[in-house]
């Protein structure tokens, strides 16, 4: 028989103002098994925990009920306190009389009655609790980072510098991500490549880091500390070991009509190509869709001209399997497509460009060698209209159907940067920026924007552009409203730059499924707690770095990447992990071998085996379910699916749940 | 293919021939069109007031009549189409409007937006098919550069109208290509023609319509074609003023099908010489 102590918390006035705590502790003394009950101002405080310890010593308690806030808040605290006093930590039950009672009721008498009912339910469950021991598992001391942009690179470097092995999987042929495409960075206007490429080189040279570029994660199994991951290395058709990166193959390649992904389609590239000069690895890849050898069987020129015999058409995709203790998602973002925003004539006029295209047009290594000109006729633009928030902050109406409800967090700042770059390159040019709000909450950000508006003479106009008309013969007419002066504007422009909304990289959704990590409605990974656990996924052992968790600029991304690395290091530094003992188990005498539980298990923790079962003294060969307790997360899906009641969850058995219901309904 | 037809006041009075032309063209394409008995004005403007149903009743009556006939309801005038389609959506999706209208009109079976409202262009695209139209063309408008003019009401609000991409529509260009002419894309094709401002503020209507005509001309159009009678009026009277022919697109269709349509009411209309290249024909 469990000897139960009940501790009712006031939570200051949070509970005590609505619930008569004296009445609760008095009433619960009559519940079966309760030998002691009291109330206290703050049970989570040291004084409250000391009250538990002394009551255990004085009354020989073997179980503890705390009537307080949600178990998400302090279950761990009270389990620890109980364990310190010699009570099994799984003999602790929480009755949530704050979120589920005092906070949502006004009438004190009713709230008190409900608090007593909730306390009785917890006592009833505790009477059926059995002491449990948490399992321990070893930790594989290697981390996987998925995504090789600035977020993934920074996380990998920080984890590797702490002495742990890190593998980086990047789906494109080079690491560097979106930051490698940028020209300058705000708010300092230093060159993106100058600060990024040394980090790329560091990552490649680091003895603890292995890069898998042109590769994808295909399968993930296991659990925190012990993930098993299949990585598909797509066939590059070029040997990374032999290639010296001389570039002769790209030069001689006769198929040069593919659009350069790196240059945003503003330049054509060969079928065998290195995305950009500082790519890592500096090894080309053959785009088999445009390669003549792969499409027609004729050609083979690159193989002939390669001085180091690195071209290998017979290469095939290869899948490697590796073990990891922690996984970091760093899958980044992309600007949204603007095909549904034809009011800006993006699909009609080559001189209407996205901001990322504008970066490439400004960049010294870009398609125009940094000579900022109009894509249509190569002329220098004199009047450029920048439109912020294209598709961003569209929360209602038709906009919500084609745009995103959130702020991209970066377009105010990079648009100020673009306008300044334009005015620097062409002092006689005019720059107009249309904005909804100018948001500059970062260190030195507002100063940067003010410099654009005040020193660089950029025209900032509050209002949105309604239409961009391609008038033919190189003229663009921009119709817009100036909300402050309350008038319509017509601007003859040479170029229009659209600051497109951002969205998570499309690969993120499939990855979230592989990782069983949750996402929000916009496909950003969800953090375990929006304020207190911002770099952890709710799935244990999965961490978040950069834009895949939400819009961020480079400083925020690097900071978060470091934070994710710190969490990974904290995990990998442990030799063993304490697991959750509240897992499913199968009563083999009841199991009929139907496989229903195996099919619903989201973690692949259930398998079937044929074994000898002793049922009421008789031996029998049966096919029965077996739970891998290391994989089971205790979700309970199998217990409600099982038609014969064979599956049960330790700490949450069917009998216990029914006892709680009975106690409430009594 | 059978349709109930709602002509509306403008097509019955001011632009009488346009409606007849369209119906004869439909007949030539094997589409059987029956005009609703005793139809009333559509309401002319979609009422945005949410607490008044009276302004929606005449549209609902037309919808109920079409439901009784068991046929989709064909429209041609942009304003009528706009009002009837949006009122129909209210009847389907807004239980408050639906309940109040049904208790007032008291039809034998409560009406809940069951009638499908189809614009003439949608009928050609989705029911006849532009390929079939092209096959029946006997007098193609070869060499004509025709600028389609959509106006606003057919396209917007796109969530309710579901007609075409409001910023980059293609349905009229599809028909223009089907009758053998060359569609001209120009930025003003989905902007306002001036609408009812033609009555109260002619200057504003002129500025707007002229901008449309100028934009079409700069993009090399020989003529402009539209299906809306009000757009046709504004572009002809307030925009082109004799500098650019503005045609009823359904009349171009009828001519291409070999029906030899005569010039129709007012200035709007089809010109029998339109098949000649660059025929700026002032009526």
Image (spheres, coloured by chain):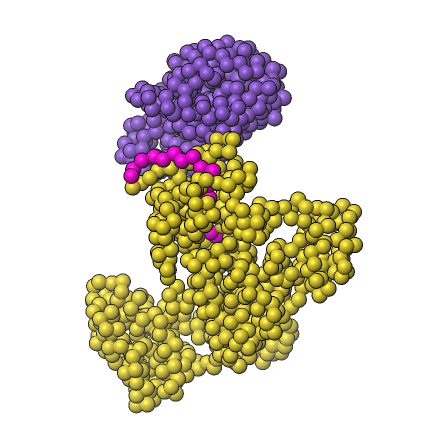
Chain colours: A yellow, B purple
Look at 51% across and 79% down and name the residue there.
Answer: A573
* Left-right relation of B5 to B107: right
A61 or B236, nearer to the observer: B236
Q: Is residue A489 found inside the magenta-colored segment of the image?
A: yes
* Left-right relation of A375 to A293: left
Q: Quadrant of residue A383?
A: top left
Asked if residue A571 can be seen in this view, the reply is: yes
Quadrant position of the N terminus of chain A in the picture:
bottom left
Look at 36% across and 82% down and name the residue there.
Answer: A81
* Left-right relation of A374 to A26: right
Q: Is residue B92 found inside the magenta-colored segment of the image?
A: no
Look at 36% across and 53% down and name the residue there.
Answer: A451
A432 or A507, nearer to the observer: A432
Q: Main secondary structure of the magenta part?
A: strand
User: Residue B133: x and y, percent?
Assistant: 59, 22
Q: Is residue B134 above or below residue B167?
A: above
A418 or B209, nearer to the observer: A418
Q: Quadrant of residue A521?
A: bottom left
User: Residue B283: x and y, percent?
Assistant: 45, 10
Span highlighted in magenta in the image = A485-504
Q: Is residue A207 above or below residue A292?
A: below
Image label count: 0
Q: Is residue B58 above or below residue A63?
A: above
Asked if residue B81 can be seen in this view, the reply is: no
User: Residue A353: x and y, percent?
Assistant: 50, 43
A367 or B264, nearer to the observer: A367
Quadrant position of the C terminus of chain A in the picture:
bottom left
Q: Residue furthest front?
A: A427
Look at 37% across and 46% down and name the residue there.
Answer: A457
User: Residue A248: x and y, percent?
Assistant: 72, 55
């Amino acid at each position: 028989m469990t000897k139960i102590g009940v501790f009712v918390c006031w939570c200051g006035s949070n509970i005590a103002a609505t619930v008569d705590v004296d009445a609760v502790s008095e009433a619960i003394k009559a519940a079966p098994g309760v030998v002691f009950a009291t109330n206290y101002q703050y049970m989570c405080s040291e004084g409250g925990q000391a009250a538990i310890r002394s009551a255990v010593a004085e009354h020989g308690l073997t179980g503890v009920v705390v009537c307080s806030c949600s178990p998400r808040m302090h279950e761990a605290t009270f389990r620890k306190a109980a364990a310190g006093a010699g009570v099994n930590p799984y003999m602790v039950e929480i009755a949530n009389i704050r979120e589920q009672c005092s906070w949502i009721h006004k009438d004190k008498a009713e709230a008190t009655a409900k608090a007593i009912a909730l306390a009785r339910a917890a006592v009833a469950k505790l009477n059926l609790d059995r002491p449990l021991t948490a399992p321990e598992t070893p930790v594989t001391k290697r981390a996987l980072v998925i995504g090789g942009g600035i977020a993934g690179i920074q996380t990998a470097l920080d984890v590797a510098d702490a002495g742990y092995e890190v593998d980086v999987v990047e789906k494109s042929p080079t690491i560097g991500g979106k930051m490698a495409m940028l020209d300058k960075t705000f708010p300092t206007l230093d060159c993106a490549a100058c600060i990024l490429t040394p980090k790329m080189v560091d990552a490649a040279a680091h003895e603890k880091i292995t890069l898998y570029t042109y590769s994808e994660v295909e399968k993930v199994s296991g659990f925190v500390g012990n993930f098993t991951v299949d990585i598909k290395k797509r066939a590059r058709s070029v040997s990374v070991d032999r290639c010296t990166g001389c570039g002769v193959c790209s030069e001689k390649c006769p198929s040069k009509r593919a659009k350069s992904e790196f240059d945003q389609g503003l330049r054509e590239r060969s079928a065998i190509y290195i995305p950009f000069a500082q790519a890592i690895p500096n090894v080309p890849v053959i785009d088999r869709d445009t390669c003549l050898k792969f499409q027609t069987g004729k050609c083979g020129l690159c193989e002939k001209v390669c001085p180091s015999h690195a071209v290998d058409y017979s290469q095939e995709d290869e899948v490697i399997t590796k073990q990891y203790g922690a996984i970091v998602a760093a899958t980044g973002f992309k600007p949204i497509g603007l095909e549904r925003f034809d009011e800006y004539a993006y699909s009609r006029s080559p001189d209407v460009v996205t901001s990322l295209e504008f970066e490439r047009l400004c960049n010294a290594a870009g398609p125009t060698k940094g000579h900022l000109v109009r894509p249509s006729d190569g002329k220098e633009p004199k009047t450029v209209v920048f439109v912020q928030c294209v598709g961003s902050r569209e929360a209602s109406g038709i906009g919500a159907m084609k745009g995103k409800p959130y702020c991209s967090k970066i377009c105010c700042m990079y648009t100020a940067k673009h306008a300044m770059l334009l005015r620097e390159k062409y002092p006689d040019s005019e720059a107009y920026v249309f904005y909804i709000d100018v948001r500059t909450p970062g260190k030195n950000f507002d100063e940067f924007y003010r410099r654009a508006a005040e020193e660089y003479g950029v025209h900032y106009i509050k209002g949105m552009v309604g239409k961009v008309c391609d008038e033919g013969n190189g003229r663009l007419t921009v119709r817009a409203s100036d909300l402050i002066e309350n008038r319509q504007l017509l601007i003859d422009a040479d170029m229009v730059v659209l600051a497109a909304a951002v969205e998570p990289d499309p690969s993120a959704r499939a990855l979230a499924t592989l990782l069983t990590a949750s996402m929000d409605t916009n496909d950003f990974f969800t953090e375990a707690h929006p304020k207190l656990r911002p770099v952890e996924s709710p799935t244990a052992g999965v961490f978040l770095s950069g834009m895949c968790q939400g819009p961020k600029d480079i400083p925020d991304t690097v900071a978060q990447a470091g934070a994710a690395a710190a969490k990974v290091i904290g995990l990998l530094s442990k030799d063993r992990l304490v697991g959750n003992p509240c897992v499913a188990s199968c009563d083999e005498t009841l199991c009929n071998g139907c496989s229903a539980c195996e099919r619903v298990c989201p973690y692949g923790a259930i398998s079937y085996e044929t074994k000898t079962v002793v049922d009421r003294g008789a031996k029998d060969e049966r096919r029965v379910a077996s739970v891998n307790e290391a994989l089971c997360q205790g979700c309970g899906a199998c217990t409600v699916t099982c038609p014969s009641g064979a599956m049960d969850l330790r700490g949450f058995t069917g009998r216990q749940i029914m006892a709680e219901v009975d106690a409430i309904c009594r | 293919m059978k349709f109930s037809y709602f002509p509306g006041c403008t097509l019955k009075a001011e632009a009488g021939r346009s409606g007849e032309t369209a119906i004869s063209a439909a007949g030539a394409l094997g589409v059987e069109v029956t005009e609703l008995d005793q139809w009333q004005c559509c309401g002319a403007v979609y009422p945005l007031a949410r607490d008044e149903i009276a302004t929606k009743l005449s549209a609902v009556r037309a919808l109920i009549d079409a439901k009784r006939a068991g046929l989709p309801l064909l429209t041609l005038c942009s304003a009528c189409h706009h009002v009837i389609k949006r009122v129909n959506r209210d009847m389907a999706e807004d239980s408050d409007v639906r309940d109040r209208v049904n208790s007032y009109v008291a039809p034998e079976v409560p009406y809940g937006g069951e009638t499908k409202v189809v614009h003439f262009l949608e009928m050609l695209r989705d029911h006849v098919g532009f390929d079939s139209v092209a096959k029946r063309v006997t007098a193609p408008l070869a060499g004509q550069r025709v600028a389609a003019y959509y106006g606003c009401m057919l396209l917007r609000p796109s969530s309710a109208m579901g007609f075409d991409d409001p910023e980059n529509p293609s349905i009229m260009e599809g028909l223009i290509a089907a009758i053998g002419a060359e569609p001209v894309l120009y930025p003003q094709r989905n902007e306002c023609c001036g609408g009812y401002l033609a009555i109260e503020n002619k200057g504003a209507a002129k500025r707007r319509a002229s901008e449309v005509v100028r934009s079409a001309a700069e993009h090399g159009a020989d003529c402009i074609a539209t299906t809306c009678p009000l757009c046709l009026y504004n572009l002809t009277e307030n925009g082109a003023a004799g500098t650019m022919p503005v045609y009823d697109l359904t009349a171009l269709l009828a001519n291409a099908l070999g029906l030899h349509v005569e010039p129709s009411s007012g200035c709007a209309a089809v010109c029998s010489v339109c098949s000649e290249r660059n025929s700026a024909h002032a009526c």
